[in-house]
Image (cartoon, rainbow, N blue to C red):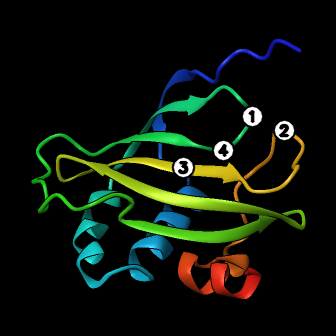
Amino acid sequence: MNEEPAKTIPLDRPISSEERTIAEWLLLHSKPSAISFLPQLDGARVTGQCSCGCPTVDLRVTDGTPPVQPQDNPVGDALGEVNGNMVGVMLLQSGGYLACLEVYDLSDIPHPYGLPELKSLRPWEAGASQNG
């Protein structure tokens, strides 16, 4: 089977309330310095989506928004579930600006699939130790 590598499908839309809620959760449940990215969610736009059927989106922060101190990636990461299937969720930054909300499957989940339920999220370290 010859699968094409995933590509970014260009988009230009406001961040959805569900995407924003998950990004906010990741920032609030990560290292304390991640909170400095919270104001960037106001007016953030989705500029691309993964072609593989996962809900990963590229983000662009509103023009004129000051950058925060760049940090190691991911600025937030967690485990979650979509229809009982395990997924990983990461929030990435580039140059002090939020850049990507990445959702990746950790099980044999059928594509396309949506975002994990907020109540299923748990910090990566806590989730990994429960599953290991």
> What amino acid does circle 2 point to?
His
**What is the secondary structure assignment of the residue under circle 4?**
loop
For the residues labelled 4 and 3, say whether their Cβ atoms are less than 8 Å apart.
Answer: no
Determine which of the numbered discs, if any, sits on residue 111 in the image. 2
Disc 4/disc 2 C-alpha distance (Å): 10 Å
Point out residue 44 in the picture as x, y percentages from the top left corner. Answer: 36, 48
Which badge, 4 or 3, is on the more N-terminal residue?
4
Compared across the picture, whether 42 is left or right of 102 comes to left
Residue denoted by label 1: 53
Residue denoted by label 4: 55
Most distant residue in the front direction: 132
Characterize the local packing of mark 4: few (<14), some (14-19) or many (20 or more) Cα atoms within 10 angstroms: many
Quadrant of the image for the N terminus?
top right
Position above or below: 70 against 58: below
Disc 1/disc 2 C-alpha distance (Å): 5 Å
Characterize the local packing of mark 3: few (<14), some (14-19) or many (20 or more) Cα atoms within 10 angstroms: many
Which badge, 1 or 3, is on the more N-terminal residue?
1
Compared across the picture, whether 69 is left or right of 111 comes to left
Characterize the local packing of mark 1: few (<14), some (14-19) or many (20 or more) Cα atoms within 10 angstroms: few
Which badge, 1 or 2, is on the more N-terminal residue?
1
Residue denoted by label 3: 102
Residue situated in front as seen by the camera: 83 or 1 = 1
Disc 4/disc 1 C-alpha distance (Å): 7 Å
For the residues labelled 1 and 2, say whether their Cβ atoms are less than 8 Å apart.
Answer: yes
Position above or below: 24 against 109: below
Tell me which residue sits at (21%, 72%) in the image. Answer: 36
Position above or below: 16 against 123: above
For the residues labelled 3 and 2, say whether their Cβ atoms are less than 8 Å apart.
Answer: no
Determine which of the numbered discs, if any, sits on residue 14 in the image. none
For the residues labelled 4 and 2, say whether their Cβ atoms are less than 8 Å apart.
Answer: no
For the residues labelled 1 and 3, say whether their Cβ atoms are less than 8 Å apart.
Answer: no
